[in-house]
Image (tube, rainbow, N blue to C red):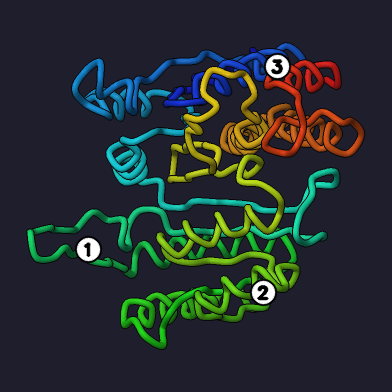
Amino acid sequence: MTKTFEIAVISGDGIGPEITTATSKVLEILSDKYSFSFRFKEILAGDRALKETGHALPSNAIDEIKKCSCCLKAPIGETARYVVLPLRQELNLFANIRPAKTIPGIPSIHSGVDLVIVRENTEGLYKKIDDISKECAINVRMITKEATERIMTVACKMAKERRKKLTIVHKANVMISCVFFRNVCLEIAKNYSEIDINEIYVDNAAYQLVINPQQFDTLVTTNMFGDILSDEAAGVTGSLGILPSSNLGQDIAMFEPVHGAAFDIEGKGIANPTAILLSCSMMLDWLGEKYSISDAKQAAKDLENSILKIYEETNIRTPDLGGKNTTNDFIRELLSIF
């Protein structure tokens, strides 16, 4: 029997609806080729949701997402604080996985970069323990043993499958919460003797990402540090418009491009769909693993390889990469490769 994946889709704001519409075409073609199908459920969230309902994240959104196999989310605009953080925290999506690697055909500062940032996704300074007055504002940085143990475990398992090298990123020379994070990570590291594990201060990590990113394989860090470093890694490897990400929980996951809503090009049909398509590749791989469907994992590889083939063998480029092609040009080329 053909497996049907029910995907909650948050089209978001700005270029979000354009790239999700384009992506749904690709997923439908893939489902025709392999032994699975998709059913898409639109979830209203973001700036448009606030305007139409008075809430950026309507009260039923979380429950509707939980009924689905996973969630595919496009960028959110000005209301991101009220959508992205609640989604990650209420769905307990504790691991944010952000790969960054150079792609032949896309100009970048360095070549041969292939790293992944494993970011704790539910606490730290983004826990929303805060207050503001006329005289000051505060944000409390929460780092717990449970959250640190589980993100380090995810990072170790990922490093084990990659090049067996893991870097713990912190600021333990200044922040007591980072001392705690580092110490808990090192305790978990004792269970993975086959992995080469080291540590680095976050400011030095930012510097090293610029001058010698090839030294890194898997990096594990706290919420805000991971947010900043992953955007820096995007700049090093070529463009924020090509980086995917996944937000993983125990039984649910959300996949999203790293870039923003890009209101300046909204409606022009020139948005780069690469990041959301690569996020879909991560989604297919996760679905294949969760439901033991090898076809989904193969589809994930085919999708990624087809995207790489466009950059390696054609001149199809959207304006963010110096080209003149449209979103639909890219999608048509991708479908022709399938």
The answer to whether residue 64 is above or below residue 200 is above
Using the image, determine if residue 1 lies above or below residue 173.
above
- The amino acid beneath tag 3 is Asn
Work out whether residue 160 or residue 62 is closer to the camera in this orientation and state it.
62
Quarter assignment of residue 62: top left
**Residue 196 appears in which quarter of the rendering?**
bottom right
Query: How far across and how far down the image is residue 121, in percent?
Result: 41, 54
Task: Residue 123 in the image: state x and y as whole percent.
Answer: 32, 58
Residue found at x 54% / y 41%: 259
Left or right of 98? Residue 263 is left
Q: Amino acid at mark 1?
A: Asn
Q: Which residue is mark 3?
A: 328
Residue on which the image places disc 2: 195
Q: Nearer the viewer, residue 207 or 174?
A: 207
Q: Horizontal placement of 324 versus 2: left or right? A: right
Mark 3 is surrounded, within 10 Å at the Cα level, by few (under 14), some (14 to 19) or many (20 or more) other residues, namely some
